[in-house]
Image (cartoon, grey):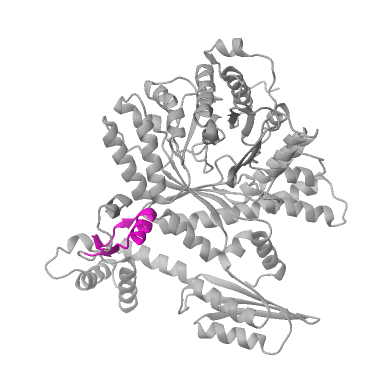
Amino acid sequence: MQVVTEKEIESAEPGTTLAVAPDALVTPLAEAAAQARNIGIVRHGPEAPSPTLIRQVARQVAARLQGAAPEVMEAVVAEVISALAVPAGAGSESVVPGVDFCAACLEQDRARARRRAVLTTTGKNQKGIAATVTARIAELGGDIIDISQTLVGDYFTMIIIVDTATLEVPFEDFRQAIESTIHEMGLQSMVMLEDVLTSLHRV
Amino acid sequence: MIFESDELRATLRMIEAEHLDIRAVTLGISLRDCPTDDLHTTCQRVFDKITRSGARLVSVAKEVQAEYGVPIVNKRISVTPIALIGEPTRASSYVPLGATLDRAARELGVDYIAGFSALVEKGMTPGDQVLIDSIPEALSTTDRVCSSVNVASTRAGINMDAIVRMGRVIKHLAERTADRGSIGCAKLVVFANIPDDNPFVAGAMHGLSEGDRVINVGVSGPGVILSAIRRLRESGRRIDLGDVAETIKRMAFKVTRAGELIGRQVAERLGDGVRFGIVDLSLAPTPAVGDSVAEILQALGLERAGAPGSTAALALITDAVKKGGVMASSSVGGLSGAFIPVSEDHAMVEAVACGALSLEKLEAMTAVCSVGLDMVAVPGDTSAETLSAIIADEMAIGVVNNKTTAVRILPLIGKSVGDRIHYGGLLGEAVVMPVSRFSSSEFVGLGGRIPAPIISLRN
């Protein structure tokens, strides 16, 4: 695997582009140097199938060929991947993913999908808090798994657990969007991945 | 599973108000596939291995930090002891290897890289000697390289010859960096029973028993424990030391859990064969107010760190931290205890300045906590023999008690007792402590090796 360091960037003319292998690693210093010298880093060459692509194909194949032997699934995935990723004429043997690799990709995918977020809203009570917050979650593609809301005197507290697998935006953007919605109503909020809370508080 | 609102509040409070953070995520990289018989080629291979393994470390750590909301303060690299990597070259100096480490660390955007190290607790090979002799130049001409030398172990005893050398090396290094407050010495640690998997720089290294690439995590959390103790004491209930231990255990549990979660995430996302190693659950202070081990001692009712009772209080804290951490994770390792680096802890600095904490009391305290005499400033005219004798004392505590101890001592050239030097950043501020004026040079000069201690008949 190619590693692009500051030295490679320095040997390129400012304002030009530097062609690197598709899976090349670019060090943080090289990235900063490229930016400072206005050098574009372009990845090119025979495209190796990305894990995302393999995952997508494997998922589709597994869904359509339920109960088929692993060898069959492996062969189908390999055929689809090589048709999609490798330009005609290039050797395809080296890039065909095995069944173990597909299974690992799927498992990783499932683990990410199991992730849930905890969202709290607290502050002075007013009309429509739950409606506004839940509407915003739905807009962003989140699915509410659990919700609890109490009122102590005039103090509003709501805890919502959201399934983040169906989010249409990255988690970071989801958090910012929800937090700004809640702050606009003059309330406090916290959005946190459930993992943090379970690991801190549950034995 | 719905959470209780006090659990949510507690989490938020720990992160926002009590400095719960991951102090260090350290990528340990084995360089055992790098040695050749040519120094230049070896340097090239070391540079390639480190940059290839660590290219994504900083970006992955930032990604995990953003997603989980738990700050990761330092991203660092540790490598196989360089004495082993340099030896086949038969070079007369390993300074080029030090420069290579520095260049690789700069390339990866990490502030420290540790492992310019040698393990000489029993004897020294030519490579070990070259490494030790290269330390003053290597550390004074680089910014990011940290060095450690293990001079003693419970199994091998104490290598006095190595300690004599280290006394001179420290003195020499202090002189070479005199214009920068002898800062070179802040990057050099002398160890007894060095751990293989310590994520905390400057004493980190990637031990010989480790895998190819490993993520080790150092959690911090003095702030979390300090405010838990304050809350306990302000609760109005009658409390005793048993309650204090219980509270510390609970908080250490949470802090360790957070560390393991983050470490496993970083290792998983780095992928490509990188394994998760250990969580080191040391209480590591920073110069920030409220993030201090000495303040914990004060919260327990000691007027200043170093007052009589400090050793007992520290023993309680260290033990409770370990018990909570071990319950939380099966991957506890490294140093795991409480650090009492003087310059890095503002309340320790104050304790030294007002005369509450002496070098001798500090040494006693190190018998019950990790790590040892850490970031201790002494007068610049302290002799190399006295430095060696101070190291030997600290090593004896580690060897006999079967624990890790270390010395990171700064003879501040041109400074005398009470003078201060401000380093800034995590290194904080050092106050020069008085050193015994009686000589040990004849004892140190005897050299040789103090035999390994007996493990039974423990009194």
- On the rendered structure, is A56 left or right of B163? left
Q: Quadrant of the N terminus of chain B?
A: bottom right
Q: Which percent across, then down, holds residue B75? A: 49, 50
Range shown magenta? A16-44
B355 or A21, nearer to the observer: B355
Q: Quadrant of the C terminus of chain B?
A: top right
- On the rendered structure, is B339 left or right of A17? right
- Is residue A28 on the magenta stretch? yes
Q: Which percent across, then down, holds residue B224? A: 69, 54
**Image point 46% across, 77% down: which residue?**
A169
**Image point 14% across, 63% down: which residue?**
A91
Q: Which percent across, then down, holds residue B298? A: 78, 44
The relative height of residue B161 versus residue B378 in the rendered view (above or below) is above
The relative height of residue B451 versus residue B100 in the rendered view (above or below) is above
The relative height of residue B17 versus residue B309 in the rendered view (above or below) is below
- Is residue A93 on the magenta stretch? no
Residue farthest to the left, as pictured = A89
Q: Is residue A36 visible?
A: yes
Q: Quadrant of residue A13?
A: bottom left
B380 or B334, nearer to the observer: B380
